[in-house]
Image: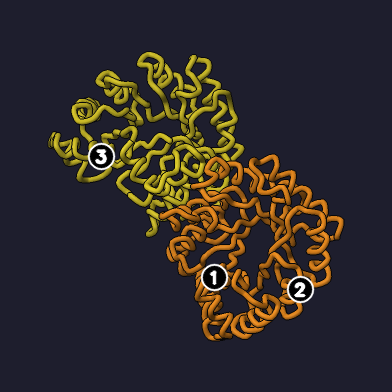
Chain colours: A yellow, B orange
Protein backbone atom coordinates (compact mmCIF):
# COMPACT_ATOMS: atom_id res chain seq x y z
CA UNK A 1 0.00 0.00 0.00
CA UNK A 2 1.40 3.33 -1.08
CA UNK A 3 0.65 5.97 1.57
CA UNK A 4 0.75 9.47 0.12
CA UNK A 5 0.75 12.20 2.77
CA UNK A 6 -1.81 14.91 2.11
CA UNK A 7 -0.68 17.68 4.43
CA UNK A 8 1.49 19.83 2.15
CA UNK A 9 -1.49 21.51 0.54
CA UNK A 10 -2.04 25.24 0.26
CA UNK A 11 -5.73 24.77 0.96
CA UNK A 12 -4.65 24.61 4.62
CA UNK A 13 -4.18 28.22 5.77
CA UNK A 14 -0.96 27.61 7.70
CA UNK A 15 0.60 25.84 4.73
CA UNK A 16 -0.54 28.61 2.37
CA UNK A 17 1.13 31.13 4.67
CA UNK A 18 4.33 29.10 4.86
CA UNK A 19 4.44 28.89 1.06
CA UNK A 20 3.80 32.61 0.64
CA UNK A 21 6.49 33.56 3.18
CA UNK A 22 8.93 30.90 1.95
CA UNK A 23 9.15 29.39 5.44
CA UNK A 24 11.22 26.40 4.47
CA UNK A 25 11.40 24.97 8.02
CA UNK A 26 7.64 24.62 8.30
CA UNK A 27 7.36 22.80 4.99
CA UNK A 28 10.32 20.53 5.67
CA UNK A 29 9.02 19.72 9.13
CA UNK A 30 5.66 18.77 7.62
CA UNK A 31 7.45 16.54 5.11
CA UNK A 32 9.57 14.80 7.75
CA UNK A 33 6.67 14.36 10.15
CA UNK A 34 4.60 12.59 7.49
CA UNK A 35 7.46 10.34 6.37
CA UNK A 36 8.24 9.41 9.98
CA UNK A 37 4.58 8.51 10.47
CA UNK A 38 4.64 6.11 7.53
CA UNK A 39 4.13 8.13 4.33
CA UNK A 40 5.82 6.54 1.31
CA UNK A 41 5.21 9.64 -0.83
CA UNK A 42 4.05 13.23 -0.36
CA UNK A 43 1.31 15.06 -2.22
CA UNK A 44 2.22 18.65 -3.04
CA UNK A 45 -0.44 21.18 -3.89
CA UNK A 46 0.16 24.93 -3.96
CA UNK A 47 -3.46 25.52 -3.07
CA UNK A 48 -6.16 28.00 -4.07
CA UNK A 49 -4.47 31.06 -2.55
CA UNK A 50 -1.22 30.80 -4.54
CA UNK A 51 -0.48 33.90 -6.63
CA UNK A 52 2.27 32.15 -8.63
CA UNK A 53 1.61 28.39 -8.56
CA UNK A 54 4.52 27.59 -10.90
CA UNK A 55 7.09 29.35 -8.71
CA UNK A 56 5.44 27.94 -5.57
CA UNK A 57 5.52 24.38 -6.93
CA UNK A 58 9.18 24.68 -7.85
CA UNK A 59 10.05 26.06 -4.41
CA UNK A 60 8.04 23.35 -2.64
CA UNK A 61 9.66 20.52 -4.59
CA UNK A 62 13.16 21.90 -4.02
CA UNK A 63 12.54 22.53 -0.31
CA UNK A 64 11.02 19.11 0.35
CA UNK A 65 13.76 17.25 -1.53
CA UNK A 66 16.34 18.79 0.81
CA UNK A 67 14.52 17.16 3.74
CA UNK A 68 13.45 13.76 2.39
CA UNK A 69 13.88 11.55 -0.64
CA UNK A 70 10.42 9.95 -0.85
CA UNK A 71 8.39 10.19 -4.08
CA UNK A 72 6.49 13.38 -4.72
CA UNK A 73 2.95 13.52 -6.02
CA UNK A 74 2.52 16.74 -7.97
CA UNK A 75 -1.03 17.90 -7.47
CA UNK A 76 -2.48 20.62 -9.67
CA UNK A 77 -5.29 21.15 -12.15
CA UNK A 78 -2.77 22.99 -14.33
CA UNK A 79 -0.39 21.01 -16.54
CA UNK A 80 2.14 23.86 -16.60
CA UNK A 81 2.32 23.84 -12.78
CA UNK A 82 2.84 20.06 -12.79
CA UNK A 83 5.54 20.43 -15.43
CA UNK A 84 7.37 23.00 -13.32
CA UNK A 85 7.37 20.44 -10.51
CA UNK A 86 8.53 17.65 -12.82
CA UNK A 87 11.53 19.70 -13.92
CA UNK A 88 12.62 20.12 -10.31
CA UNK A 89 11.94 16.56 -9.14
CA UNK A 90 15.00 14.32 -8.70
CA UNK A 91 13.30 10.95 -8.26
CA UNK A 92 10.26 9.47 -9.97
CA UNK A 93 7.15 11.64 -9.58
CA UNK A 94 3.44 10.84 -9.56
CA UNK A 95 1.29 13.26 -11.53
CA UNK A 96 -1.97 14.13 -9.79
CA UNK A 97 -3.98 13.94 -12.07
CA UNK A 98 -5.78 13.48 -15.35
CA UNK A 99 -9.50 13.06 -15.90
CA UNK A 100 -10.89 10.79 -18.66
CA UNK A 101 -11.20 13.73 -21.06
CA UNK A 102 -9.18 13.11 -24.22
CA UNK A 103 -7.41 16.47 -24.37
CA UNK A 104 -6.47 16.35 -20.72
CA UNK A 105 -5.19 12.77 -21.02
CA UNK A 106 -3.10 13.65 -24.06
CA UNK A 107 -1.49 16.60 -22.30
CA UNK A 108 -0.84 14.74 -19.05
CA UNK A 109 0.25 11.42 -20.59
CA UNK A 110 2.78 13.29 -22.76
CA UNK A 111 4.27 14.64 -19.51
CA UNK A 112 4.20 11.15 -17.99
CA UNK A 113 6.24 9.79 -20.88
CA UNK A 114 8.64 12.72 -21.11
CA UNK A 115 9.45 12.62 -17.38
CA UNK A 116 9.08 8.84 -16.81
CA UNK A 117 6.47 9.61 -14.19
CA UNK A 118 3.55 7.71 -12.75
CA UNK A 119 0.04 9.14 -12.98
CA UNK A 120 -3.32 9.26 -11.23
CA UNK A 121 -6.34 8.90 -13.54
CA UNK A 122 -9.62 10.06 -12.05
CA UNK A 123 -12.83 8.39 -13.20
CA UNK A 124 -14.60 11.62 -14.14
CA UNK A 125 -14.88 13.78 -17.20
CA UNK A 126 -16.31 17.11 -18.32
CA UNK A 127 -19.83 15.81 -17.75
CA UNK A 128 -18.99 15.52 -14.05
CA UNK A 129 -18.61 12.92 -11.36
CA UNK A 130 -20.16 9.51 -12.15
CA UNK A 131 -23.21 8.34 -10.24
CA UNK A 132 -22.72 4.61 -10.47
CA UNK A 133 -20.21 1.83 -10.84
CA UNK A 134 -20.83 1.25 -14.55
CA UNK A 135 -19.93 4.85 -15.40
CA UNK A 136 -16.84 4.73 -13.19
CA UNK A 137 -15.66 1.59 -14.96
CA UNK A 138 -16.36 3.09 -18.37
CA UNK A 139 -14.30 6.17 -17.53
CA UNK A 140 -11.48 4.13 -15.99
CA UNK A 141 -11.42 1.90 -19.08
CA UNK A 142 -10.99 4.98 -21.25
CA UNK A 143 -8.04 6.06 -19.12
CA UNK A 144 -6.45 2.59 -19.30
CA UNK A 145 -6.91 2.44 -23.08
CA UNK A 146 -5.39 5.88 -23.64
CA UNK A 147 -2.51 5.10 -21.28
CA UNK A 148 -1.82 1.97 -23.34
CA UNK A 149 -1.78 4.10 -26.51
CA UNK A 150 0.96 6.12 -24.86
CA UNK A 151 2.86 2.99 -23.82
CA UNK A 152 2.38 3.71 -20.12
CA UNK A 153 2.73 0.55 -17.99
CA UNK A 154 -0.46 -0.33 -16.12
CA UNK A 155 1.49 -0.46 -12.82
CA UNK A 156 2.32 3.21 -13.33
CA UNK A 157 -1.35 4.11 -13.45
CA UNK A 158 -3.36 4.86 -10.29
CA UNK A 159 -7.10 4.70 -10.98
CA UNK A 160 -9.20 6.86 -8.66
CA UNK A 161 -12.96 6.09 -8.48
CA UNK A 162 -13.45 9.57 -6.93
CA UNK A 163 -14.96 9.60 -3.46
CA UNK A 164 -18.23 11.19 -2.45
CA UNK A 165 -18.57 12.56 1.07
CA UNK A 166 -20.85 10.18 2.94
CA UNK A 167 -23.19 13.02 3.88
CA UNK A 168 -23.69 13.90 0.21
CA UNK A 169 -23.62 10.65 -1.75
CA UNK A 170 -23.96 7.87 0.78
CA UNK A 171 -25.52 5.52 -1.76
CA UNK A 172 -22.35 5.91 -3.89
CA UNK A 173 -19.92 4.38 -1.40
CA UNK A 174 -20.79 0.75 -2.11
CA UNK A 175 -20.45 1.43 -5.85
CA UNK A 176 -17.07 3.02 -5.19
CA UNK A 177 -15.83 0.03 -3.20
CA UNK A 178 -16.95 -2.32 -5.97
CA UNK A 179 -15.31 -0.06 -8.56
CA UNK A 180 -11.98 -0.39 -6.76
CA UNK A 181 -12.33 -4.18 -6.97
CA UNK A 182 -13.23 -4.06 -10.65
CA UNK A 183 -10.57 -1.52 -11.64
CA UNK A 184 -8.01 -4.14 -10.62
CA UNK A 185 -9.47 -6.46 -13.27
CA UNK A 186 -9.26 -3.96 -16.14
CA UNK A 187 -5.87 -5.12 -17.38
CA UNK A 188 -2.86 -7.26 -16.53
CA UNK A 189 -0.71 -6.46 -14.64
CA UNK A 190 -3.42 -4.84 -12.53
CA UNK A 191 -3.40 -1.05 -12.43
CA UNK A 192 -3.03 0.58 -9.04
CA UNK A 193 -6.11 1.99 -7.35
CA UNK A 194 -6.15 5.14 -5.26
CA UNK A 195 -8.51 7.32 -3.26
CA UNK A 196 -8.25 10.79 -1.83
CA UNK A 197 -9.44 9.44 1.49
CA UNK A 198 -10.40 12.57 3.42
CA UNK A 199 -13.18 13.33 0.93
CA UNK A 200 -15.32 10.57 2.43
CA UNK A 201 -15.72 12.46 5.70
CA UNK A 202 -15.87 16.04 4.41
CA UNK A 203 -18.35 18.06 6.45
CA UNK A 204 -18.93 15.33 9.06
CA UNK A 205 -17.98 15.35 12.74
CA UNK A 206 -16.64 11.79 12.82
CA UNK A 207 -13.83 12.26 10.34
CA UNK A 208 -11.19 9.89 11.64
CA UNK A 209 -13.64 7.03 12.24
CA UNK A 210 -15.17 7.40 8.77
CA UNK A 211 -11.74 7.69 7.15
CA UNK A 212 -10.27 4.60 8.78
CA UNK A 213 -13.39 2.49 8.31
CA UNK A 214 -13.64 3.34 4.63
CA UNK A 215 -9.90 2.79 4.13
CA UNK A 216 -10.09 -0.65 5.74
CA UNK A 217 -13.02 -1.60 3.51
CA UNK A 218 -11.22 -0.28 0.44
CA UNK A 219 -8.07 -2.26 1.29
CA UNK A 220 -10.30 -5.34 1.55
CA UNK A 221 -11.43 -4.55 -1.99
CA UNK A 222 -7.93 -4.22 -3.42
CA UNK A 223 -6.98 -0.58 -2.89
CA UNK A 224 -3.24 -0.14 -3.41
CA UNK A 225 -2.70 3.57 -2.69
CA UNK A 226 -4.29 6.44 -0.79
CA UNK A 227 -3.74 10.13 -0.25
CA UNK A 228 -4.38 10.59 3.46
CA UNK A 229 -3.24 12.13 6.72
CA UNK A 230 -0.47 9.85 8.01
CA UNK A 231 -0.38 11.78 11.30
CA UNK A 232 -3.75 10.22 12.17
CA UNK A 233 -2.30 7.38 14.22
CA UNK A 234 -5.52 5.39 14.47
CA UNK A 235 -5.89 5.57 10.70
CA UNK A 236 -2.37 4.25 10.19
CA UNK A 237 -2.96 1.52 12.80
CA UNK A 238 -6.08 0.42 10.90
CA UNK A 239 -4.16 0.40 7.62
CA UNK A 240 -1.20 -1.56 9.02
CA UNK A 241 -3.60 -4.08 10.55
CA UNK A 242 -5.65 -4.45 7.36
CA UNK A 243 -2.45 -5.17 5.43
CA UNK A 244 -1.40 -7.63 8.12
CA UNK A 245 -4.69 -9.46 7.71
CA UNK A 246 -4.03 -9.63 3.96
CA UNK A 247 -0.64 -11.20 4.80
CA UNK A 248 1.38 -8.29 3.41
CA UNK A 249 3.40 -7.88 6.60
CA UNK A 250 4.41 -10.72 8.88
CA UNK A 251 2.65 -10.95 12.23
CA UNK A 252 4.64 -10.38 15.38
CA UNK A 253 3.36 -9.12 18.72
CA UNK A 254 4.75 -5.66 18.00
CA UNK A 255 3.64 -5.52 14.36
CA UNK A 256 2.54 -1.88 14.59
CA UNK A 257 5.95 -0.74 15.82
CA UNK A 258 7.75 -3.08 13.44
CA UNK A 259 5.93 -1.55 10.48
CA UNK A 260 6.77 1.97 11.58
CA UNK A 261 10.46 1.10 11.98
CA UNK A 262 10.73 -0.31 8.44
CA UNK B 1 -25.86 -7.25 10.34
CA UNK B 2 -26.84 -9.58 13.11
CA UNK B 3 -24.74 -8.91 16.20
CA UNK B 4 -24.62 -11.92 18.52
CA UNK B 5 -23.17 -11.13 21.95
CA UNK B 6 -20.51 -13.61 23.04
CA UNK B 7 -20.21 -12.91 26.75
CA UNK B 8 -22.56 -15.50 28.27
CA UNK B 9 -20.06 -18.28 27.93
CA UNK B 10 -18.92 -20.57 30.72
CA UNK B 11 -15.37 -20.50 29.39
CA UNK B 12 -15.13 -17.17 31.23
CA UNK B 13 -14.45 -18.01 34.88
CA UNK B 14 -16.88 -15.46 36.35
CA UNK B 15 -19.68 -16.67 34.10
CA UNK B 16 -18.90 -20.30 34.98
CA UNK B 17 -19.15 -19.36 38.66
CA UNK B 18 -22.43 -17.51 38.15
CA UNK B 19 -23.87 -20.55 36.36
CA UNK B 20 -22.70 -22.96 39.03
CA UNK B 21 -24.11 -20.82 41.85
CA UNK B 22 -27.31 -19.95 39.94
CA UNK B 23 -26.60 -16.24 40.29
CA UNK B 24 -29.42 -15.04 38.09
CA UNK B 25 -28.65 -11.32 38.53
CA UNK B 26 -25.15 -11.66 37.07
CA UNK B 27 -26.39 -13.52 34.00
CA UNK B 28 -29.33 -11.17 33.43
CA UNK B 29 -27.10 -8.13 33.82
CA UNK B 30 -24.71 -9.57 31.22
CA UNK B 31 -27.67 -10.13 28.88
CA UNK B 32 -29.06 -6.60 29.33
CA UNK B 33 -25.66 -4.98 29.01
CA UNK B 34 -25.02 -6.68 25.67
CA UNK B 35 -28.46 -5.86 24.30
CA UNK B 36 -28.12 -2.22 25.37
CA UNK B 37 -24.76 -2.09 23.58
CA UNK B 38 -26.31 -3.26 20.31
CA UNK B 39 -26.55 -7.06 20.42
CA UNK B 40 -29.45 -8.41 18.35
CA UNK B 41 -29.01 -11.91 19.77
CA UNK B 42 -27.07 -13.62 22.56
CA UNK B 43 -24.85 -16.66 22.33
CA UNK B 44 -25.26 -19.05 25.27
CA UNK B 45 -22.60 -21.60 26.09
CA UNK B 46 -22.45 -23.48 29.36
CA UNK B 47 -18.69 -23.79 29.00
CA UNK B 48 -16.08 -26.44 29.71
CA UNK B 49 -16.52 -26.43 33.50
CA UNK B 50 -20.22 -27.30 33.51
CA UNK B 51 -21.04 -30.48 35.43
CA UNK B 52 -24.58 -30.69 34.04
CA UNK B 53 -24.68 -28.84 30.72
CA UNK B 54 -28.33 -29.76 30.03
CA UNK B 55 -29.58 -28.33 33.32
CA UNK B 56 -27.27 -25.33 32.97
CA UNK B 57 -28.48 -24.60 29.44
CA UNK B 58 -32.12 -24.79 30.54
CA UNK B 59 -31.45 -22.48 33.49
CA UNK B 60 -29.54 -20.00 31.34
CA UNK B 61 -32.27 -19.83 28.69
CA UNK B 62 -35.00 -19.36 31.28
CA UNK B 63 -33.04 -16.76 33.22
CA UNK B 64 -32.09 -14.73 30.16
CA UNK B 65 -35.62 -14.77 28.73
CA UNK B 66 -36.87 -13.10 31.90
CA UNK B 67 -34.52 -10.19 31.21
CA UNK B 68 -34.67 -9.74 27.43
CA UNK B 69 -36.55 -11.02 24.40
CA UNK B 70 -33.75 -11.06 21.81
CA UNK B 71 -32.94 -14.25 19.90
CA UNK B 72 -30.80 -16.84 21.61
CA UNK B 73 -27.96 -18.68 19.95
CA UNK B 74 -27.61 -22.08 21.62
CA UNK B 75 -23.95 -22.98 21.58
CA UNK B 76 -22.83 -26.50 22.36
CA UNK B 77 -21.00 -29.39 20.76
CA UNK B 78 -23.70 -31.68 22.19
CA UNK B 79 -27.04 -32.00 20.40
CA UNK B 80 -28.83 -33.01 23.61
CA UNK B 81 -27.70 -29.81 25.32
CA UNK B 82 -28.90 -27.75 22.36
CA UNK B 83 -32.22 -29.58 22.41
CA UNK B 84 -32.65 -28.82 26.11
CA UNK B 85 -32.21 -25.13 25.22
CA UNK B 86 -34.61 -25.39 22.28
CA UNK B 87 -37.35 -26.77 24.53
CA UNK B 88 -37.02 -23.77 26.84
CA UNK B 89 -36.70 -21.07 24.17
CA UNK B 90 -39.79 -18.92 23.56
CA UNK B 91 -38.72 -17.13 20.37
CA UNK B 92 -36.84 -18.41 17.37
CA UNK B 93 -33.41 -19.81 18.25
CA UNK B 94 -30.16 -20.12 16.35
CA UNK B 95 -28.38 -23.45 16.73
CA UNK B 96 -24.61 -23.11 17.11
CA UNK B 97 -23.60 -25.30 15.25
CA UNK B 98 -23.15 -28.14 12.81
CA UNK B 99 -20.01 -29.12 10.94
CA UNK B 100 -20.13 -30.50 7.38
CA UNK B 101 -20.10 -34.10 8.65
CA UNK B 102 -23.16 -35.98 7.43
CA UNK B 103 -24.19 -37.52 10.77
CA UNK B 104 -23.81 -34.23 12.59
CA UNK B 105 -25.81 -32.37 9.95
CA UNK B 106 -28.59 -34.94 10.04
CA UNK B 107 -28.89 -34.68 13.82
CA UNK B 108 -28.73 -30.89 13.91
CA UNK B 109 -30.92 -30.22 10.87
CA UNK B 110 -33.61 -32.48 12.34
CA UNK B 111 -33.60 -30.20 15.39
CA UNK B 112 -33.70 -27.13 13.14
CA UNK B 113 -36.84 -28.42 11.43
CA UNK B 114 -38.52 -29.63 14.60
CA UNK B 115 -38.01 -26.36 16.45
CA UNK B 116 -38.23 -23.99 13.44
CA UNK B 117 -34.76 -22.74 14.32
CA UNK B 118 -31.96 -21.11 12.36
CA UNK B 119 -28.55 -22.75 12.24
CA UNK B 120 -24.83 -22.03 11.96
CA UNK B 121 -22.93 -24.35 9.61
CA UNK B 122 -19.17 -24.37 10.11
CA UNK B 123 -16.95 -25.10 7.11
CA UNK B 124 -15.03 -27.90 8.77
CA UNK B 125 -15.39 -31.65 9.14
CA UNK B 126 -13.79 -34.58 10.92
CA UNK B 127 -10.62 -34.14 8.87
CA UNK B 128 -10.17 -30.75 10.54
CA UNK B 129 -10.11 -27.08 9.70
CA UNK B 130 -9.65 -26.28 6.00
CA UNK B 131 -6.42 -24.68 4.82
CA UNK B 132 -7.67 -22.83 1.78
CA UNK B 133 -10.66 -21.19 0.16
CA UNK B 134 -11.48 -24.10 -2.15
CA UNK B 135 -11.87 -26.51 0.76
CA UNK B 136 -14.00 -23.98 2.68
CA UNK B 137 -16.31 -23.59 -0.29
CA UNK B 138 -16.54 -27.35 -0.80
CA UNK B 139 -17.53 -27.85 2.86
CA UNK B 140 -19.99 -24.94 2.81
CA UNK B 141 -21.56 -26.33 -0.37
CA UNK B 142 -22.09 -29.65 1.37
CA UNK B 143 -23.85 -27.87 4.22
CA UNK B 144 -26.05 -25.89 1.82
CA UNK B 145 -26.97 -29.03 -0.13
CA UNK B 146 -27.86 -30.99 3.00
CA UNK B 147 -29.86 -28.05 4.38
CA UNK B 148 -31.82 -27.99 1.12
CA UNK B 149 -32.53 -31.73 1.52
CA UNK B 150 -34.08 -30.87 4.85
CA UNK B 151 -36.08 -28.00 3.37
CA UNK B 152 -34.22 -25.39 5.42
CA UNK B 153 -34.44 -21.92 3.85
CA UNK B 154 -31.04 -20.53 2.85
CA UNK B 155 -31.71 -17.35 4.84
CA UNK B 156 -31.92 -19.51 7.96
CA UNK B 157 -28.42 -20.81 7.40
CA UNK B 158 -25.34 -18.98 8.72
CA UNK B 159 -22.18 -20.20 6.99
CA UNK B 160 -19.03 -19.81 9.07
CA UNK B 161 -15.66 -20.01 7.23
CA UNK B 162 -13.99 -20.64 10.62
CA UNK B 163 -11.41 -18.07 11.64
CA UNK B 164 -7.75 -18.71 12.29
CA UNK B 165 -5.94 -16.58 14.85
CA UNK B 166 -3.70 -14.23 12.90
CA UNK B 167 -0.64 -15.39 14.87
CA UNK B 168 -1.28 -19.01 13.82
CA UNK B 169 -2.66 -18.92 10.29
CA UNK B 170 -2.03 -15.44 8.97
CA UNK B 171 -1.94 -16.64 5.37
CA UNK B 172 -5.51 -17.97 5.84
CA UNK B 173 -7.17 -14.62 6.51
CA UNK B 174 -7.35 -13.49 2.89
CA UNK B 175 -8.80 -16.88 1.93
CA UNK B 176 -11.37 -16.50 4.69
CA UNK B 177 -12.42 -13.03 3.51
CA UNK B 178 -12.80 -14.34 -0.02
CA UNK B 179 -14.75 -17.35 1.27
CA UNK B 180 -17.26 -15.01 2.92
CA UNK B 181 -17.76 -13.28 -0.43
CA UNK B 182 -18.17 -16.59 -2.25
CA UNK B 183 -20.45 -18.20 0.34
CA UNK B 184 -22.97 -15.49 -0.51
CA UNK B 185 -23.01 -16.77 -4.11
CA UNK B 186 -23.69 -20.42 -3.21
CA UNK B 187 -27.44 -20.16 -3.56
CA UNK B 188 -30.34 -17.74 -3.92
CA UNK B 189 -31.51 -16.18 -1.67
CA UNK B 190 -27.97 -15.79 -0.34
CA UNK B 191 -27.20 -17.68 2.85
CA UNK B 192 -26.06 -15.64 5.82
CA UNK B 193 -22.37 -15.58 6.65
CA UNK B 194 -20.99 -15.49 10.17
CA UNK B 195 -17.71 -15.43 12.06
CA UNK B 196 -16.76 -15.99 15.66
CA UNK B 197 -14.79 -12.77 15.60
CA UNK B 198 -12.64 -13.01 18.70
CA UNK B 199 -10.80 -16.03 17.28
CA UNK B 200 -8.86 -13.77 14.92
CA UNK B 201 -6.99 -12.10 17.78
CA UNK B 202 -6.59 -15.07 20.14
CA UNK B 203 -3.21 -14.93 21.84
CA UNK B 204 -2.31 -11.46 20.53
CA UNK B 205 -1.92 -8.25 22.48
CA UNK B 206 -3.83 -6.03 20.03
CA UNK B 207 -7.15 -7.79 20.29
CA UNK B 208 -9.61 -4.95 19.81
CA UNK B 209 -7.71 -3.45 16.86
CA UNK B 210 -7.43 -6.82 15.12
CA UNK B 211 -11.08 -7.63 15.83
CA UNK B 212 -12.48 -4.38 14.49
CA UNK B 213 -10.20 -4.29 11.47
CA UNK B 214 -11.06 -7.84 10.45
CA UNK B 215 -14.78 -7.23 11.07
CA UNK B 216 -14.73 -4.13 8.86
CA UNK B 217 -13.00 -6.07 6.07
CA UNK B 218 -15.45 -8.94 6.45
CA UNK B 219 -18.45 -6.58 6.25
CA UNK B 220 -16.93 -5.19 3.05
CA UNK B 221 -16.94 -8.79 1.77
CA UNK B 222 -20.58 -9.42 2.61
CA UNK B 223 -20.55 -10.71 6.19
CA UNK B 224 -24.08 -10.62 7.62
CA UNK B 225 -23.60 -11.85 11.20
CA UNK B 226 -20.91 -12.10 13.87
CA UNK B 227 -20.49 -13.46 17.36
CA UNK B 228 -18.54 -10.75 19.14
CA UNK B 229 -18.16 -8.61 22.25
CA UNK B 230 -20.72 -5.81 21.87
CA UNK B 231 -19.27 -4.07 24.94
CA UNK B 232 -16.20 -3.21 22.88
CA UNK B 233 -17.36 0.27 21.91
CA UNK B 234 -14.72 0.86 19.26
CA UNK B 235 -15.64 -2.43 17.64
CA UNK B 236 -19.31 -1.46 17.55
CA UNK B 237 -18.42 2.01 16.21
CA UNK B 238 -16.42 0.39 13.39
CA UNK B 239 -19.32 -1.93 12.60
CA UNK B 240 -21.94 0.83 12.61
CA UNK B 241 -19.71 2.94 10.36
CA UNK B 242 -19.01 0.08 7.95
CA UNK B 243 -22.73 -0.51 7.61
CA UNK B 244 -23.29 3.21 7.10
CA UNK B 245 -20.75 3.18 4.27
CA UNK B 246 -22.70 0.29 2.71
CA UNK B 247 -25.83 2.47 2.96
CA UNK B 248 -27.58 0.21 5.45
CA UNK B 249 -28.27 3.03 7.89
CA UNK B 250 -28.98 6.62 6.89
CA UNK B 251 -26.24 9.17 7.56
CA UNK B 252 -26.88 11.87 10.10
CA UNK B 253 -24.30 13.75 12.16
CA UNK B 254 -25.13 11.62 15.18
CA UNK B 255 -25.34 8.29 13.33
CA UNK B 256 -23.52 6.37 16.08
CA UNK B 257 -26.00 7.47 18.74
CA UNK B 258 -28.95 7.08 16.36
CA UNK B 259 -27.99 3.46 15.70
CA UNK B 260 -27.69 2.69 19.39
CA UNK B 261 -31.12 4.21 20.13
CA UNK B 262 -32.88 2.04 17.51
Q: Is residue A241 left or right of residue B42?
A: left
Q: Nearer the viewer, mark 2 or mark 3?
A: 2
Mark sitting on residue B7: 1
Q: Quadrant of residue A184?
A: top right
Residue B35 vertical placement versus A210 (above, below): below
Q: Is residue B179 left or right of residue B165?
A: right
Note whether residue A53 is visible.
yes
For image coordinates 46% across by 41% down, the residue present is: A243
Instruction: Using the image, name the chain to which the residue with label 3 belongs.
Output: A
Residue B119 vertical placement versus A134 (above, below): below
Q: Helix or strand or loop: what does disc 2 sit on?
A: helix
Q: Position of residue B135 (x, y in %)?
A: 70, 42
For image coordinates 63% across by 80% down, the residue present is: B60
* Quadrant holding the N terminus of chain B: bottom right
What separation in Å lies between label 1 and label 2 (alpha carbons)?
A: 21 Å
Number of callouts: 3
Choose between A233 and B59: the one closer to the eye.
B59
For image coordinates 59% across by 28% down, the residue present is: A186
Note whether residue A166 is visible.
no
Q: Helix or strand or loop: what does disc 3 sit on?
A: loop
Q: Which residue is mark 3?
A: A10
Amino acid sequence: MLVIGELINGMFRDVAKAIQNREVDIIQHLAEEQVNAGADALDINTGPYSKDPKADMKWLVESIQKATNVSLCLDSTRADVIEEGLKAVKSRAIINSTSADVEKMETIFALVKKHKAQVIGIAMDKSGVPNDKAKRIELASRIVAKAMDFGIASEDLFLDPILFPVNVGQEQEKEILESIREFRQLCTPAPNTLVGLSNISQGTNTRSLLNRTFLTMAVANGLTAAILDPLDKELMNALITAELILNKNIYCDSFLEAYRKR
